[in-house]
Image: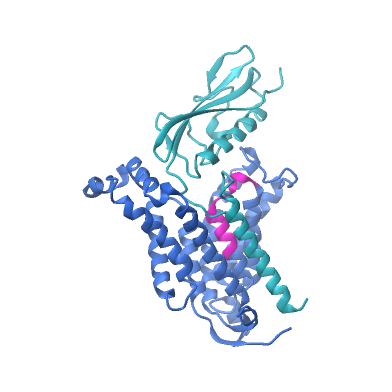
Chain colours: A blue, B cyan
Amino acid sequence: VIDRLVDERGRAPAIGILRGLLGVVVLLHLRPFVDDVRAGVSYDDRFWLPFATWLPKVPDALWTALVWTGVVAGALMVVGLCSRAATATAFAVVAVELLASQTHFHHNRTFLAIVLGGVALLHPGQAWSVDALLRRPRREIPLWPLHLLRAQVCLVYLASGTSKLLDRDWVGGLSLWDRVVRHQENVPSWAVDVMTERWPYYVIGPAAVATELFIGVGLWWRRTRPAAVVVAAAFHVSIEIAAKVEVFSYAALAALLVWVAPRGVRTEESG
Amino acid sequence: MGRRGRIKAFAAALLALQIGFAVNGYRDPHAFFAFQPFRESSTWRAEIVRVTWDGERRSIADGWAGYEWNELVDVPMLSNPFGPAERHASYGIGATLDFLDDALDWVADHTPADVDTRYLEATVTYHRNGRGPYVEVVRSHDREPP
């Protein structure tokens, strides 16, 4: 099966749409960095911490250049011009920002980097792009990066769901309940009485964990995929409403496009 | 190694790295790259003081020697720590305490206009998923004498 997945070729026009959406997400992600650069603030002007002492500090001028390069790459991704190079550049910029300081780490940024890396490998200018208008797009592309990206996306849901499953406070609903009680001013007044009771969370907690695990497994199988996509979409919309997670909801919703079935799939023998 | 072998090796390495980070998240307080979001509902606040060379303890909540905590430590996880209400430990209380410890060191090293502080100390009061309160004290290293 793995050999077949490695050798598959086909067309995946949905990746062109994903590229354009990710371009917007990259621009949104870079906005606070741009604000700092325009104000003459570099990341090391404030508390920062390298991941390893041997990692070099990014010089201020290079940091500024990186941020603006990322903006240009994001804009090119949106219109689909030099799509592959732009996506690879955006991936590099996001990855360098992420690795420059421990204080830059956020799960949503890691997710964005993963999806950008995967899309860069997928010839993202083949459809829905200026590239496709200017030159004849490739009829077929290798599909192994799509399968790899799908596996990585599933791992994200499974890692998150498993960590909660192994956490007694999460699976028992205590974490969720405590959070809602502490932020009950954000709960509609008609729902406060019920939402601040402890007992519903004995069901809501396990259901939340099961949702993530279902998405992580369900996306992988053709029969359960439509349901998993719908559940994932609802899941991300609800997270966006309930919590501030930077660009995660947008990136994750866009990334659901990797589950659109590629067209004209055939297997090419290779050594 | 042929094309097929190279692709399989690359994919296996990438997935192994991702799984490795996910497993490492169970021992790393920050769970870097482990995808363990919304880990805790824990909350915290801190009373941060600078201890001078003559032993005085002075709060830094209102700034000191021209410095402000929120300007020096402009990290969402650690900003506005002074209460009175406890704030959410968005990446878990373990990550918060670990970062706060490092932040105190960084502030101690990057406040040259402050000549009379020996070290900074934070007394952290926190609730872990509603349990507590617990109290933990973290402090910076000693600064060079003036």
On screen, residue B97 versus residue B8, left or right, reads left
Within the magenta stretch, is there residue A108? Answer: yes
Classified by dominant secondary structure, the portion drawn in magenta counts as: helix
Position in image of residue B76 (x %, y %) = 51, 41
Above or below residue A261? Residue B117 is above
Is residue A96 visible in the rendered image? The answer is yes
On screen, residue B34 versus residue B8, left or right, reads left
Position in image of residue A86 (x %, y %) = 63, 67
Position in image of residue A181 (x %, y %) = 32, 42
Residue furthest to the top in view is B54
Q: Looking at the rendering, in which quadrant would you find the C terminus of chain A?
A: bottom right
Residue furthest to the right in view is B1
**What residue is shown at x 58% (from left), y 69% (from top)?**
A149
Position in image of residue B88 (x %, y %) = 44, 40
**In which quarter of the view is residue B9 placed?**
bottom right
Magenta residues, as a range? Answer: A101-115
Q: Looking at the rendering, in which quadrant would you find the N terminus of chain A?
A: bottom right
**What residue is shown at x 48% (from left), y 63% (from top)?**
A252
Q: Nearer the viewer, residue A75 or A16?
A: A16
Above or below residue B120? Residue A34 is below
